Amino acid sequence: MVDEDRVARPIDEAATDGAPREQDKHDSLMVFDTSYLYYRAFFGVPSSLRAPDGTPVNAIRGLLDAITRLTEQYNPRRIACAWDDDWRPAWRTALVPSYKAHRVIDEVPEGVDAEETPDELGVQVPLIREVLEAVGMPIMGAAEHEADDVLGSLAAQHDGRCWVVTGDRDLFQLVDDTTRVIWVGQGVAKHLVVDSAWLLDKYGVEPGRYVDFSVLRGDPSDGLPGVKGVGEKSAARLTREFGSLEELVSAAMHGTGTISPAIRRSITESAEYILKAEAVVSVVLNLPVAVPAKLPLTVDAARVAELSERLGLAGPLSRLVHACS
């Protein structure tokens, strides 16, 4: 039986024995950070995995396997895939222009023929959507918002247990009495179940203050520099000492609180960034997204059969359909 309240332990292989699970008592929802999962799969599954016509399918295969494995493991009553309708919203970049700026490729490097370097992930993204639609998977996005905001809104609006599957640490802010983050940053097989006790042990902060901690520490993967001279330990200490980022900035500017001169100077110099970054890092929780219907999924059998043959993914598709039936 899966212990739904376990903390930071790898997947329990013995939990797939078909015995009734504790979480079956709850109207549980599992939501997937789709782009994270297929992006990780693209680099983690061999690129030699191809459809009969030569189309790469490694990202598709890895995503399907991840959804199947976790669905079988946790047996949720409802599932959904969050989609990036806008992976870099203008309202976030207006606040912090460096937000994800390093991920933007403005032009093909000199001397490289774009036609000779096909985007082997890009060609799979529409196929991923086609496959998920065929098996009846709810795909949820929102205009001018990232998948993170969809994940957060679904978790906030679902009345019951929710598991958020992602490798993005910023989503640790969603943890509460009913929401856990299944963190797959080290792979699905080595995933961790993150709750408030884990966050306190790992970082020394409550989930409700994780945004403040993240803003101060920074996140280079998202183009967020943080505050100069503030590392993980000092970010946690400052987060615990002050009730909000606004209170911290005010204390730095007015010379109150136990802040070292160097850190006080850095916070004062970064005051505008700190307050704007808070809005950038905070996940939107009130998007008008509908909690998906209970399983089983409504499968388009003819379409699944055609995709199975065309992509050479009969096994993975069959396993996913079975897991969601």
Image (cartoon, grey):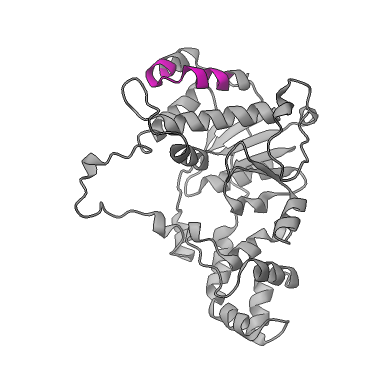
Q: Is residue 39 above or below residue 252?
A: above
Residue 22, x across and y down, in percent: 80, 30
- Report which quarter residue 264 is drawn in: bottom right
Kindly indicate the quadrant of the structure image that contains residue 170: bottom right
Q: Is residue 274 left or right of residue 248?
A: left
Residue shown at the point (25%, 54%) measured from the top left: 109
Indicate the quadrant containing the N terminus: top left, top right, bottom left or bottom right. Answer: top right
Q: Residue at 22% of width from left, 40% of height from top?
A: 115
Percent across and percent down for residue 299 are 54, 18
Q: Is residue 66 left or right of residue 131?
A: right
- Residue drawn at 50 percent across, 13 percent down: 301
Q: Quadrant of the C terminus?
A: top right
Q: Position of residue 93 (x, y in %)?
A: 45, 61
Verify whether residue 225 appears in magenta: no
Work out whether residue 66 can be spotted.
yes
Residues 118 and 275: in front is: 118
- Total numbered badges shown on the rendered structure: 0
Decide whether residue 313 is among the magenta residues. yes
Q: Is residue 17 left or right of residue 91?
A: right
Report the span colored magenta.
307-321
Above/below status of 250 relative to 280? below
Answer above or below: position of 51 versus 98: above
- Observer-nearest residue: 26 or 216? 216
**Residue 171: percent from left, percent from top:** 62, 50
Does residue 284 show up? no
Main secondary-structure element of the magenta-colored stretch: helix
Q: Which residue is painted at 51% across and 22% down in the image?
A: 316
